[in-house]
Image (cartoon, rainbow, N blue to C red):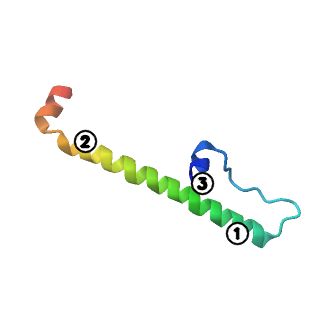
Amino acid sequence: MLWHYCTGAMTIPVKGASEEDAAFLSRMIEWDSHNHMILTWIRNTSIPSISNLWAALTMQNLHGIC
């Protein structure tokens, strides 16, 4: 289900003209919680990879690159 947020199949809710505020708020909270799961997953999988790679480099390796 979360994949639909990445592909854009699940878009941010828009309040319908006849929709009650409570129903819209419920849909918005659900969407927001799933959206934050995606953002957290991206952060938790990307940032450690970058920091692990950076830690593996030594100053000597950096001198050769720069």
Give the amino acid type for the residue marked by disc 2 in the picture.
Leu
Q: Residue beneath label 2, please? A: 53
- Residue at 17%, 33% in the rendered image: 62
Tell me which numbered mark, 2 or 1, is placed earlier along the sequence: 1
Q: Residue furthest right?
A: 18
Q: Quadrant of the image for the C terminus?
A: top left
**Please, is residue 60 above or below residue 15 in the view?**
above
Query: Residue at left 64%, top 66%?
Result: 29
Which residue ends up furthest to the left in the rendered image?
60
Between 63 and 35, the one lying in front of the other is 35
Classify mark 2: residues with Cα within 10 Å, few (<14), some (14-19) or many (20+).
few
Q: Residue furthest front?
A: 1
Above or below — where is 61 with respect to 46?
above
For residue 26, which numbered disc appears in the image? Answer: 1
Query: Which is nearer the N-term, disc 3 or disc 2?
Result: 3
Helix, strand or loop at label 2? It is helix
Secondary-structure class at tag 3: loop
Amino acid carrying mark 1 in the image: Ser
Q: Which residue is mark 3?
A: 1
Quarter occupied by residue 1: bottom right
Q: How far from the left and from the top, in percent, is residue 28?
A: 68, 63
